[in-house]
Image: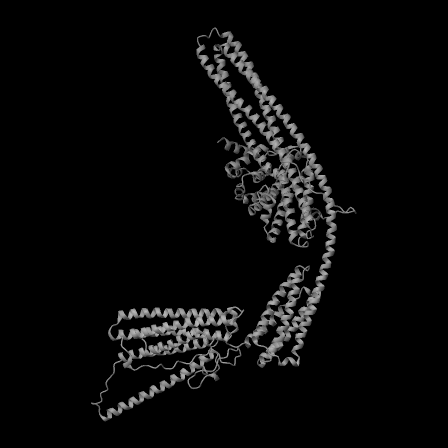
Amino acid sequence: SVQHCVYTVSISKAINSTETPVKEKHARRIILGTHREKGAYTFWSYALGFPLASSSILSWKFCHVLHKVLRDGHRNVLQDCMRHHSSLVEIGKLWAHLHDKYGQLVALYTKLLCTKMEFHVKHMEIPPNLEATDEVLERTAGTDINNVFQLTVEVFDYMDTELRLAETVLRQLNTSIAISTLTSGQCRLAPLIQVIQDCSHLYHFTVKLLFKLHACLPADTLQGHRDRFHDQFHSLKTFFNKARDMLYFKRLIQIPKLPDVRTQSDGGEQMDIFDQTFGPPNGGFDDRDLQIESLKRDLELLRAELERVKAEAQRYITQLKSQINSLEAELEEQRAQKQRALVENEQLRMELEAISCNNAAASLLCAERAQATEQRYNKLKEKHTELVTSHAELLRKSADTVKMLSATQQTQDEVERTKQQLSFEVDRIKQEADMKLEEQKFEMEKLRRELEEKLAEISRIKATLQSSEQVSVHTSMTALQAEKERLMRSVSEKEAELSSLRQAAQVQQSSLQQERERNSRELGELQGKLQDKASQEELLKQKLLEEQFALLQGTVTEAENIIQDAVAKLDDPLHIRCTSSPDYLVSRAESTLTSIDKLKKGHAEYLTNMNDAGALLRALTQFSHLAADTIVNGSATAHMAPTDHADKLTENCRTCATESLQFLKDLKTKITLQKADPAFIRVIVQKILHLGQELRPKSMDIRQDELGDLVDKEMAATSAAIEEAVRRIDEMMNQARKDTSGMKLEVNERILNSCTDLMKAIRMLVVASTDLQKEIVEGGRGAATIKEFYARNSRWTEGLISAAKAVGWGATEMVESADKVVLHTGKYEELIVCSHEIAASTAQLVAASKVKADRNSKKLSTLQQASRLVNEMAANVVASTKTGQEHLEEKDTMDFSGMSLIKLKKEEMESQVKVLELESQLENERLRLGELRKKHYVLAGVPLDQVSEGNGETFSTTHPVSMSPKPTKPTLMKKPALAQKPNIPPKTMVSPR
């Protein structure tokens, strides 16, 4: 297409080996081409074909065009250029090793471009033209101070590459004959326009980031950043001053002006540019100071923005003027062509009159050809009219653009919005004007060639043309002349409007200059007030630090007195008779550990901010009291502990006091305040805590705050186990009905029905026990919570838990035994033993619930009735089992009629041997059962001296069970006595089912 052809031609014209600057129109067409194809694929496909390694000037101009494309091209250009990052690096390395002036510049320029691409790929929020708002910069930096620090270093590196290139270019110009007015000098200076634009934005970024760093970090940490900022500031100011003095830059870009360096009275330079620009980093501000600083920053931003907008407007006006001049030159050329055409037409008319009489025969044919020529001429006229119209439209758009520029100087918001519209409109106008001019030039050339052909054709048939045709041509030319005069008048009017707009802009600039001077005076006054206030705040801050430290010393002295008083009690003879429980010692030690953590946190906060010692003082007061309490109670606990534990506990208490006093001593002086560490105190308190836990009774394995939840869980688990047992018994009943019949089916049904009745009775017992337990808790807890009630009565709670576990386990075992009996893989005795075990477990559950229940409670009566029903159902299970066993066992009839005396004697002896063997096995099993019960009592926490020697039973339930936490009392954690053998009715009284 035509646009693609223009794009490629512009690339070849912009990048060549001639030592001249890149023309603006070629660079603009390349940038427009990247926006059309939404990338730089075509640009790189042509750029890689250039012999960059053979010509340093060609490489220099290639870097210049690439810099423009990166800044103003489509947003996808950055990704396309990153694909050729390695090629740029290789070009830079190649020219860096060659002794060529342009080669050295190319090496620096490629490094700058690589740094630019890497920075913007890493921070995609910031566009390559660096026109990012403060909000975008804040979002890129984030809230992590490490990210802000790293971003500041990257911006410094970015600025260094820009400044090194600018300094090298200016150094070569100073040492060579070329100056800024020659093409050789302009070839070197042209890329510095983009460098100036980049540096202005990078300087702004640096200022913002250093503000943010000084608000979060101390000044000493950022000393390196400030030194680097000072160096870059001086280099940038020198570069801007030199560039501002060069004639080449004055008509192309408005160079920003940096603040002057403040000097001392003795004439020495004070390197405090950052403080002059930003103010002290950690000083306190009131609302008025914050508003002043905000207004100052806004004023600087508006000033820089206004300068940039004015520079852009001036450049756009200059470009529009140059386009108007070129259009006027083209119009003048067309006017000359029209004049020559008139002269030729006059000559043709005279010749046609001379030979008109001789060519009458061919007049008709010539008339037709003349008509065609006239139509083509009319087409030429229409094209010219379109050109004139386009030119007028361009002038109108230029006037609109200038008006829009003038309106943008009112407010900052309007400046930003109008600038974007102006840039877009001007780019579009430029694009349309360039495209129309190219198309019109192409059309004009085509029409000129057609006109020359038609003139040659007219010369061949000029004898046949009539005078009337010449008159019409003359009329057309007259109309064109009138149109031209009208167009010239329109151009004059537009120039007058442009002049008036320029005058208005100058008036606005003068008013802005006056406003700037007034703001400068106000700024000086406010800075003076700010310095006075900063000195006053410094004095107040020093006084506050001294008062806080004095308060800390007083608190430490009081804490030392408290610890020393506790140590004195260890040696007090009256304290020997004081005792304490291990549980209380453990609670005090745990509280002390918590206070040590708070003390460490308060100490760290005080070191960070010595203006506020409140947290450290509160933690120190709490620690001193708790530590003294732990020392005193540790000594009191040692009076009841075994000798080894008592000695260790007393020694650790004294060590705890020593370490605490040493820590408090470190807090009293500023020299040792930093190294004060309560870690050693924590180690000693943990040892005291461990010794207290060792002295606790062994039954306290479960945390007391978990006992309440554990009771509910065990009761729920018991209910679930009973429900599961009933379900399995129903399944076994259905399976027995399928697999057996006759007497076996009758026996199985009888056993399983009795087991089902027992499970239902147990379920009623568990429900009654749960209701009674809730009544006990609600009536006895008072204002405490349920968990606190269970923790306070931990031994009673543990008895409930043990009983609930035993009931659930017994139900599960009974189901397993019943299943084995039905399947003929088990023994009937297992089912009888399980019945006895369930009866004993339910008795334990009733006893545990009865201890704290009210004797007149209806729910207690319900529980006792449920307990009696369980015993009856357990007896029924035993009776059903034995009855079934008798029905199914086959009785062997003993027939001794055929046996002799010797044979009978022999059988008698064998029977006696078998009886002795069975008695021996029975005795061994009884011993084993006794050992198992002893082990059970030990694990349950029941002292062996409270176990009856006859049958292993505990003390009779007629004696009330004490719920005191003293370990010498019997607890409910012991295994209950087995239930007595139930009364089984005679076989004749059991009705068959």
| Position of 658 relative to 137 (above/below) | below
Q: How many marks?
A: 0
Does residue 401 appear in this view? yes
The residue lying toward the viewer, choosing from 176 and 534, is 534
The residue under the point 65% across, 54% down is 217
The outermost residue toward the top is: 357
Image x and y of residue 924, in percent: 38, 85
Could you tell whether 673 is left or right of 717 in the image?
A: right
Q: Looking at this rendering, what residue extends furthest in the bottom direction?
A: 901
Residue 175 visible at all: no
**Vertical placement of 732 versus 311: above or below?**
below
Q: Quadrant of the C terminus?
A: bottom left
Question: Between residues 9 and 476, which one lies in front from this camera angle?
Answer: 476
Q: Picture coordinates of residue 617 (x, y %)? A: 66, 65
Give how far across and how far down residue 117 sits, in percent. 57, 44
Colour convention? one colour
> In front here: 738 or 862?
862
The residue furthest right is: 266
Q: Nearer the viewer, residue 394 or 543?
A: 543
Q: Residue at x 31, y 75 (%)?
A: 751
In percent of width and height, residue 195 lies at 63, 40
Image-based side of 944 in relation to 295, left or right: left
Question: Which residue is at a point 64% across and 79% down the rendered structure image?
Answer: 575
Q: Determine which quarter of the picture holds residue 986.
A: bottom left
